[in-house]
Image (spheres, rainbow, N blue to C red):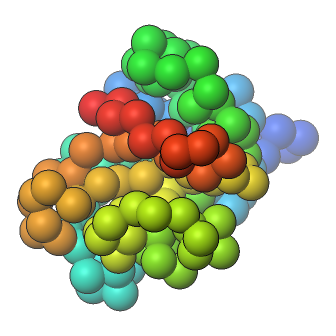
């Protein structure tokens, strides 16, 4: 895989692998540089989950960041509020946490918070990998959770 090339004034310049990725490459801050497979696997062990192959491939291209417009359409069809969760972009994998670790989830009645992995958030809006139905070794759904709603809003995106 090609490494990122440093742009003179624009952060990282996309490599050919970005052409078929989920990432918006208009601007790529250095913090979203690609990550090696061994480091992804280390974080998966920390979280106690299996990272789906497709997501692993995307992290090998870029470790978090803004989503491409066509990927955003997937979310737009599910809810108009999801953008709050990804306003700051998908977090780098070392920042992912279990729902039970999040201050926002402490007071809400959601079962099996340990099987919700927060990958993007903005205040009360969370985008999570949801392993609750498939277990930590399965292929998770992606869910949007808004803890400011009463009752807590949980929408399945994929």
Say which of 112 and 107 sits in front: 107
Residue 115 in which image quadrant: bottom left
Q: Give the residue furthest to the right.
A: 9
- Up the image or down, 65 lies above or below 77; here it is below
Q: Is residue 69 above or below residue 21?
A: above
Residue under the point 40% across and 34% down: 155
Q: Position of residue 76 (x, y in %)?
A: 51, 16
**Residue sitting at x 47%, y 69%:** 99
- At 17% from the left and 70% from the top, the residue drawn is 136
The quadrant of the picture occupied by the C terminus is: top left
Residue 20 in picture, x, y percent from top left: 36, 26
Residue 145, x across and y down, in percent? 51, 46
In the image: residue 40, left or right of residue 101? left
Q: Position of residue 59 (x, y in %)?
A: 40, 55
119 lies left or right of 39 = right
Q: Is residue 51 above or below residue 121?
A: below
């Amino acid at each position: 895989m090609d490494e990122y090339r440093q742009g003179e004034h624009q952060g990282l310049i996309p490599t050919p692998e970005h052409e078929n990725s989920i990432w918006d490459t208009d601007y790529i801050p250095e913090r979203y540089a690609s990550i090696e497979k061994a480091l992804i696997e280390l974080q998966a062990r920390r979280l106690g989950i299996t990272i789906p192959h497709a997501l692993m491939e995307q992290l090998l291209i870029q470790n978090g960041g803004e989503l491409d417009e066509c990927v955003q359409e997937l979310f737009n069809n599910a809810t108009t509020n999801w953008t709050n969760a990804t306003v700051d972009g998908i977090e780098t994998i070392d920042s992912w946490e279990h729902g039970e670790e999040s201050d926002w989830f402490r007071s809400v009645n959601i079962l099996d918070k340990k099987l919700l992995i927060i990958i993007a958030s903005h205040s009360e809006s969370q985008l999570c990998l949801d392993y609750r139905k498939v277990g930590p070794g399965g292929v998770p759904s992606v869910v949007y959770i808004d803890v400011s709603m009463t009752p807590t809003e949980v929408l399945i995106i994929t």
